[in-house]
Image: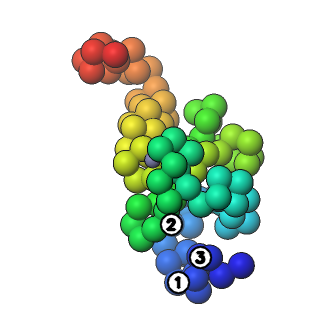
Amino acid sequence: MSFFGGGGTETFDRKKYESLTLSLRQTVLERSHHRCQKCSVKFKGSNGPFFEHINGSLKDNRPSNLRSLCEKCFEHVKKKESRKGRLGSMRNNLGQVFGK
Ligand SMILES: [Zn+2]
């Protein structure tokens, strides 16, 4: 149970992971065998893990709604989630700008 080390940086991101607890993250990681669930790369160093909310709801932190991703794959999710979260109604406009 020492995967996340001494927890020295835990308080840092506390707000961000308000309800995404350590045990939740461990559950998801164990389920994915500490690999990215998109490209199957193994997590190490700054490569991850990052967690995607599958249904797009950042408040839904159930393990079934979470997916562990590497830094590269999470880049795409981050764009998606920030669009949903902060820009909300601008989503359609942005979609046109990006051509998707
Ligand atoms: Zn990946």
Specify whether 43 is left or right of 19: left
Q: Which element is circle 1 on? A: loop
Determine which quarter of the picture holds residue 53: top right
Q: Which mark is residue 8?
A: 1
- Which residue type carries mark 2? Asp
Q: Which mark is residue 4?
A: 3
Residue name at image x 32 percent, y 21 percent: 94
Q: CA distance from mark 3 to mark 2?
A: 14 Å
Q: CA distance from mark 1 to mark 2?
A: 11 Å
Query: Of label 3 and label 2, which has the lower sequence position?
Result: 3
Specify whether 18 is left or right of 74: right
Nearer the observer: mark 1 or 2; the answer is 1
Tag 2 residue: 13
- Which residue type carries mark 1? Gly
Q: Which element is circle 2 on? A: loop
Q: In the displayed structure, would residue 69 be above or below residue 65? A: below
